[in-house]
Amino acid sequence: MDSSKHQAAGPLQLIQSFYRNRQLIQQMTKREVMGRYKGSVFGLVWSFFNPLLMLTVYTFVFSVVFKARWNTGIDSKTGFALALFVGMIVHGLVAESISRAPSLITSNVNYVKKVVFPLEILPWTVMGAALFHTTINLFVWSIFYFVINFSLHWTIVLLPLVFFPLVLFSMGTSWVLASLGVYFRDVNQLISLVVTLLLFLSPVFYPISSIPEKYQPLLYMNPLTLIIEQTRGILISGQIPDWKPWFLSVVLSVIVACLGFAWFQKTRKGFADVL
């Protein structure tokens, strides 16, 4: 049965758990990534094909069919593709991590019942795989941008800082969903709906400036909005992020991560009985 000696739920225990199990997280993340493409002919090459295919489809639909335009300072259709891809990258990171969360424990029952295993690291492995795919997507985007502009903005080095609060927020959410998924199996279906809603309620297909000003504060309540806007500013415009809202997002994300971790550690005691 799952060990109880590592079930302390404070912020310090969160950091200690990650550091203590870092090698195991690395190994399981690698297995998570390789397992997804196991048996396929092209293997990891699919991780390049998938975003390119979706980028092509979305760009055609919104820039050709609906004739959407985006003021990025370059060719309108190309600019729309670049701006759209950035939004897809940010949304994809969150979507991949939280979509898997509700089934993490139920699909790894052997870790709960048969061995002493740090269950709290399972969301880290999914996040690691999501970050791997995000890195590939950013690499594809950078090549596309460089081919068009023959340069990249130096501000691209600030991306890890911008993504940091998003990773923490996603982890806190994943711990809560992983726990709830054990007790309420409908959570998995609900999250699929939430992920789809986030795609259209985030400025992925449109700039925040296209929303009536009175509704913009509501859109900024979406945790993805600030990250998408800052990422576009860094990659497309070469803008340095506004550090005040970034700092506030870090504080809120740390709180979410700590609360999510605490919830998971407190509720894990009943996993074996339910499963």
Image (cartoon, rainbow, N blue to C red):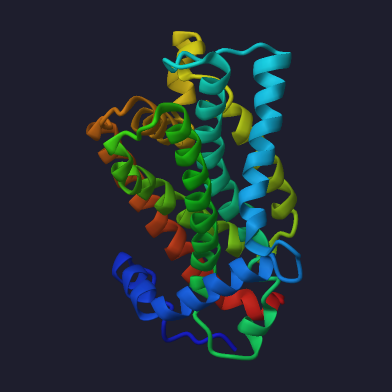
Q: Is residue 146 left or right of residue 246?
A: right
Q: Relative to residue 137, is residue 180 depicted above or below?
A: below
Residue 65, image quadrant: top right
**Which quarter of the rendering shows the N terminus?**
bottom right
The residue positioned 47% from the left and 44% from the top of the image is 138
| Viewer-closest of 157 and 176 | 157
Asked if residue 35 is positioned above or below residue 143 in the image, the reply reads below
- Quadrant location of the C terminus in the rendered image: bottom right
Position of 44 with respect to 153 (left or right) is right
Q: Residue at x 57, y 26 (%)?
A: 81
Q: Could you tell whether 123 is left or right of 112 in the image?
A: left
Please tell me which residue is depicted at 49% across the width and 72% down the height of the picture: 121
Judge by depth and name the residue closer to the eye, 21 or 131. 131
Residue 213 in sight from this viewpoint? yes
Q: Position of residue 2 (x, y in %)?
A: 56, 85
- Give coordinates of residue 68: x percent, y percent: 62, 13
Q: Position of residue 93 (x, y in %)?
A: 53, 48
Image x and y of residue 51, in percent: 63, 43
